[in-house]
Amino acid sequence: MGIFFAKKKPPSRITEQDKAILQLKQTRDKIKQYQRRIEQNLEKERLLAKKLIQNKQKERALLLLRKKKFQEQILSKTDGQLENLEHMVHDLEFAQIELKVVNGLKVGNIALKKLHDLLSIDEIEKVMDETKEGIEKQREINEILSGELTENDESEVEAELNALLAAEIEEKAPEIPEDVTLPEVPEDITLPEVPEELPEKKIERTKERTKETVALEA
């Protein structure tokens, strides 16, 4: 009986891409360990070859250096393999991100389409009109309750104020009495005569006549 009522296992969240990425990373780590081991051997062999040369064992030093050169070539090849693995891991991880983005866009488009089906353009316009009317009505109610004046009332109040100011200015202006008599200009005023010649010219002319008389008597 327990077999029939056993709970089903939830589907695994680990995808094939996750497994591939994990395997690539494990291989990458093994290659790095192998590289470290080769680098340690190269350093040991370099020191040993140096010691053999010092001991005049040239042939053994030459064989050791050849072995060292071969290991360096292997290390160079592992660098290329490691670089390829890194690129592969990066590409798979980025592909997973792209897949999540695409799935998210699909879900968003489906939800947006459902919302569009629920709300038509006519219904949206109706709701907007009703909202606008409700706001306008509430504003009028608030004005009535708070005792605020409408724009028309404000215009009438300003006009009345201007009329009162004009009346005030007119009352304060000085009045000119109607019975004020201006002095008359007398008609028989005698103005002084203007001399025909200037005094200086008259004196000069008298002097000239005196000289002429003296000359004739002589």
Image: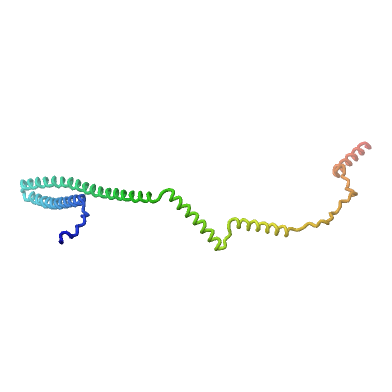
Residue lying farthest to the right in this orientation? 217
Up/down of 57 relative to 162, above or below: above
Residue lying farthest to the bottom in this orientation? 146
User: Which colour scheme appears in the figure?
Assistant: rainbow
* Front residue of this view, candidates 69 and 102: 102
Image coordinates of residue 217 in percent, x first then y, are 94, 37
Q: Is 208 on the left-hand or right-hand side of 169?
A: right
Quadrant in the picture for residue 159: bottom right
Image coordinates of residue 162 in percent, x first then y, are 66, 57
Which residue is located at x 35 percent, y 49 percent? 113
The N terminus - image quarter: bottom left
Q: Is 123 on the left-hand or right-hand side of 37?
A: right
Which residue is located at x 23 percent, y 48 percent? 92
The number of numbered discs placed on residues in the rendered structure image is 0
Which residue is located at x 25 percent, y 47 percent? 95
Image coordinates of residue 101 in percent, x first then y, are 29, 49
* Front residue of this view, candidates 111 and 26: 111
Residue lying farthest to the top in this orientation? 216
Image coordinates of residue 58 in percent, x first then y, are 6, 46
The C terminus - image quarter: top right
* Front residue of this view, candidates 135 and 105: 135
Q: Is 80 on the left-hand or right-hand side of 53?
A: right
